[in-house]
Image (spheres, rainbow, N blue to C red):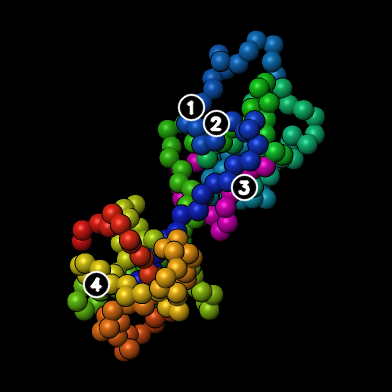
């Protein structure tokens, strides 16, 4: 069985949201004289969303420390801005690690800052956080003919995915034919005299190209090309 990882984007709404995931950090010498220093929240893989987010790492008693998810950091900024209007920058620093997003990380006008008090999501100095909409698959086992398999961890819930990455590098899904293309013989049920621009959601292939004994046809994704097709 082949698994894949699908990366989700970050949806940004509100033009005043500044410097998302910007590594540049503002030093005390950069702040205008007389301005109130802003607030900084922290997010880390070993954090806890019930903590204050004010510490860069968990304390010795593990009673306080960084948040665990970027969404919790976003919500903390919303709550902070809902109170007394800050006069300095509001920053969320992400520690190194992988943050798997179960849904898109959405920003709305409620997350916007001002020129004097921008909202900034940034990497913690010297570190590299990774935001991913995929899920890790472990326990891969080699099989015959170079095929690797892994147990499906979905527990009955179907996954919809298109991409697989291994050690950060994209891997292509298996395809048929291995070289070249199948031929579209016509549009199923379509008027042969209709314009080529008419929409269609079915097509016919040349005889003998699709075999009846193929399994899991419901998992197949077709890709069609009419011009400029790659020569593979």
Q: CA distance from mark 2 to mark 3?
A: 15 Å
> Which labelled disc corresponds to residue 19?
2
- Left or right, 172 with reference to 152: left
Q: Position of residue 75 (x, y in %)?
A: 68, 44
* Nearer-the-camera pick, 169 or 189: 189
* Residue for badge 1: 24
Segment colored magenta: 95-108
Which type of secondary structure does the marked residue at label 2 adopt? Answer: loop
Q: CA distance from mark 3 to mark 1?
A: 22 Å
202 falls in the magenta region:
no
* Nearer-the-camera pick, 68 or 135: 135
Label 4–label 1 contact, CB within 8 A: no
* Residue for badge 3: 106
Foreground: disc 2 or disc 4: 4
* Nearer-the-camera pick, 12 or 60: 12
Q: Position of residue 133 (x, y in %)?
A: 49, 55
Q: CA distance from mark 4 to mark 1?
A: 48 Å
Q: CA distance from mark 2 to mark 1?
A: 9 Å
Quarter where residue 60 is shown: top right
Question: How many residues crowd mark 3 within 10 Å: few (<14), some (14–19), many (20+)?
Answer: few
> Which labelled disc corresponds to residue 71?
none
Q: CA distance from mark 2 to mark 4?
A: 45 Å
Label 3–label 4 contact, CB within 8 A: no
Which type of secondary structure does the marked residue at label 4 adopt? Answer: loop
- Left or right, 178 with reference to 23: left
Foreground: disc 4 or disc 1: 4
Please tell me which of labels 2 and 1 falls first in the chain.
2
Q: Is residue 25 above or below residue 2?
A: above
Q: Residue placed at 36% from the left, 78% from the top?
A: 204
Q: Residue placed at 44% from the left, 64% from the top?
A: 195
Quadrant location of the N terminus in the rendered image: bottom left
């Amino acid at each position: 069985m082949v698994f894949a990882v699908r990366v989700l984007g970050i949806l940004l709404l509100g033009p005043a949201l500044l410097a998302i995931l910007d590594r540049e950090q503002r030093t005390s010498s950069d702040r205008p004289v007389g301005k109130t220093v802003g607030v900084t929240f922290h997010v880390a893989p070993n954090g806890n969303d019930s903590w204050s987010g004010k510490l860069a790492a968990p304390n010795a008693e593990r009673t306080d420390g960084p948040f665990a998810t970027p969404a919790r950091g976003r919500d903390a900024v919303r709550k902070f801005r809902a109170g007394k209007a800050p006069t300095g920058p509001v920053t969320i620093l992400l520690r190194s690690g992988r943050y798997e997003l179960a849904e898109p990380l959405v920003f709305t006008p409620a997350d916007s800052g001002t020129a004097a008090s921008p909202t900034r999501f940034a990497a913690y100095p010297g570190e590299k956080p990774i935001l991913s909409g995929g899920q890790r698959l472990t326990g891969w086992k080699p099989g015959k003919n170079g095929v690797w398999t892994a147990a499906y961890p979905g527990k009955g819930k179907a996954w919809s995915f298109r991409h697989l990455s291994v050690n950060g590098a994209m891997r292509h899904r298996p395809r048929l034919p291995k070289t070249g293309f199948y031929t579209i013989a016509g549009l199923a049920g379509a008027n042969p005299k209709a314009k080529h621009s008419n929409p269609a959601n079915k097509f016919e292939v040349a005889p003998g190209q699709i075999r009846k004994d193929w399994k899991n046809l419901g998992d197949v994704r077709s890709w069609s090309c009419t011009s400029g097709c790659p020569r593979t």
